[in-house]
Amino acid sequence: MTTDILTDADRSFLFVLGSSRPDGNTEILARAAAEQLPAGIPQRWVDLAKDPLPDFQDGRHEDGTWPVSEQEEELRRATLDATDIVIASPLYWYAVSASTKRYLDYWSGWLGVPGMDFKKRMGGRTLWGVTVMAEENEATADGLITSLNNTAAYMGMRFGGVLLGNGSRPGQVRADERALTRAKTFFEREAPLARFPSEEETGER
């Protein structure tokens, strides 16, 4: 895949839900943003809590092949089929949730699958984030944002940023007018090629 910006006709979205409870605030905000996408753009939603992946075991430097479960294969296929991947995870201890981190850990394994060219195929696609947190100070989410940005930079992906919302009790994000307003145009924003912070400072790439 090239790094050219795709037209709407070429795009497809994968929403990866990483909350530990159904219909959580982060999912509400992600769906509010998804509602603004043109009707012709395919959307696929995966709830990591409903069909959890087992803990990732790194076998990249071991002999033999690591058995691939049906749910891993399905998620891997869904990831590679999407032009836009949206990580929708609440802010847990200043980072993504455990199930979300486990999903990203599996990327490490997919990097080493012979013939898959996972990193090359992911290059030029776009990574987005959505998170809702109890804190009103949005700087609290800096760690999560940096993690997703650096993941995109390593993979040669574009990074569309993170849609932030405030809420703790179920449904509380619906009262965050600023977040809901931003959701209306979130996926319209430019998604530049991701860069590591050190590259931003030196201008290197």
Image (tube, helix red, strand yellow):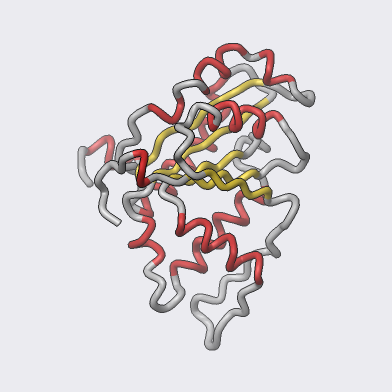
Which residue is drawn at the image coordinates 59% and 79% (left, top)? 66
**Pick the front one: 170 or 78:** 78
| Residue 74 percent coordinates (x, y) | 59, 64
- Quarter-of-image position of residue 32: top right
* Residue 192 point in image, percent of width and height: 31, 37
Give the percent coordinates (x, y) of residue 7. Answer: 31, 40
Outermost residue toward the bottom?
Answer: 64
Left or right: residue 119 compared with residue 133: left
Q: Residue at x 48, y 46 (%)?
A: 85
Is 152 situated above or below 185?
Answer: below
**Where 122 sits versus 127, above or below?**
below
Where is 96 relative to 65, above or below?
above
Q: Residue at x 55, y 21 (%)?
A: 138
Q: Residue at x 36, y 39 (%)?
A: 8
Q: Quadrant of the N terminus?
A: bottom left
Q: Is residue 114 left or right of residue 30?
A: left
